[in-house]
Image (tube, rainbow, N blue to C red):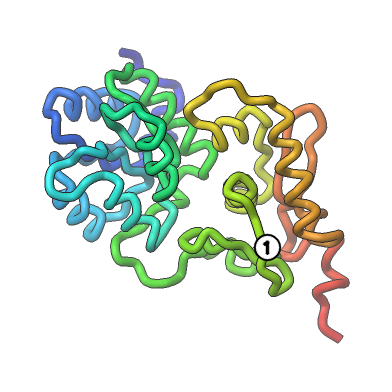
């Protein structure tokens, strides 16, 4: 194993690993540590919840079949309070199990047996999409589910309720539209490639048409309306981004938001 060149940048990323198999848990923590991450590992669901109540983590890797409290229940509990990235591990490979994982808010899903190198690569990809160190918190952490730097952003996201609002109007979004809008608005100004957005929407892979992202973006803009659509910007030849706005109000919307 070799240490990545970005080890220093990753050293501040704190990851909780909950896996009841001693060999797998030790292997995962070893690979993550050598890759530059800071890790804490536990062997049960109840121990994972205690750690989450006492400490802030930037990401969690949870085995679904944990003793006493399973990984799905932990994931659902976390989603009641914040958007810390979560990767689920399981020996269950059936479609209904994967769907259940995503329904409770998991960011990705890895079926055993898997390569530790693949897991590390997925961890980095998830953190790149969600923003390193921006999604963590303790349990319980109160009712404010919006990161401080997005408190006044024109598009307001409620990640726990899976809802979004623009100009006090609730948007009727599909599951995929909500996931795209969540990713873009979490990191205004950050450009997501079409491949990254496809990976976000269809983490298990499969035959997916790249134009699917363009269709979802088109529908999102229609639902946001003429002014709101300006917040979702195309970066030609690469992908999309949410407008990074001055004082959380973009130039093209300033006149609209100014009070007489």
Left or right of 66 in this view: 56: right
Q: Which of the 4 image quadrants contains residue 92?
A: top left
Dot 1 surroundings within 10 Å: few (below 14), some, or many (20 or more)? some
**Residue displayed at 70% across by 49% down:** 242
Tell which of 175 and 36 is nearer to you. 175
Q: Which of the 4 image quadrants contains residue 172?
A: bottom right
Q: Which residue is mark 1?
A: 171
Image location of residue 26, percent across then percent down:
17, 27
Q: Which of the 4 image quadrants contains residue 194?
A: top right
Q: Does residue 116 lie above or below 84 as drawn?
A: above
Image location of residue 181, percent across then percent down:
64, 50
Q: Is residue 251 visible to us here?
A: no
Image location of residue 129, percent across then percent down:
54, 39
Quadrant of the rendering where the N terminus is positioned: top left
Helix, strand or loop under label 1: strand
Quadrant of the rendering where the C terminus is positioned: bottom right
**Residue displayed at 61% across by 31% down:** 198
């Amino acid at each position: 194993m070799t240490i990545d060149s970005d080890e220093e940048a990753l050293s501040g990323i704190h990851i909780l690993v909950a896996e009841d198999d001693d060999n797998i848990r030790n292997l995962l923590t070893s690979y993550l540590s050598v890759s530059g991450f800071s890790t804490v590992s536990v062997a049960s669901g109840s121990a994972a919840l205690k750690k989450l109540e006492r400490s802030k983590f930037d990401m969690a890797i949870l085995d679904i079949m944990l003793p006493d409290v399973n990984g799905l229940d932990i994931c659902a509990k976390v989603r009641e309070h914040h958007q810390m990235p979560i990767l689920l591990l399981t020996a269950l490979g059936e479609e209904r199990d994967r769907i259940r994982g995503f329904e409770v808010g998991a960011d990705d899903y890895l079926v055993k047996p898997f390569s530790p190198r693949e897991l590390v690569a997925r961890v980095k990809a998830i953190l790149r999409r969600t923003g390193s160190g921006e999604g963590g918190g303790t349990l319980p952490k109160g009712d404010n589910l919006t990161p401080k730097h997005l408190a006044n952003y024109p598009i307001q996201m409620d990640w726990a309720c899976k809802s979004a609002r623009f100009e006090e109007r609730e948007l009727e979004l599909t599951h995929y539209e909500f996931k795209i809008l969540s990713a873009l608005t979490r990191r205004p100004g950050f450009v997501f490639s079409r491949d990254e957005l496809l990976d976000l929407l269809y983490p298990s892979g499969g035959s997916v048409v790249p134009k699917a992202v363009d269709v979802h973006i088109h529908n999102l803009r229609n639902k946001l309306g003429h002014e709101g659509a300006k917040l979702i910007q195309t970066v030609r030849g690469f992908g999309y981004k949410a407008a990074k706005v001055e004082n959380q109000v973009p130039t093209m919307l300033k006149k609209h938001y100014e009070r007489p």
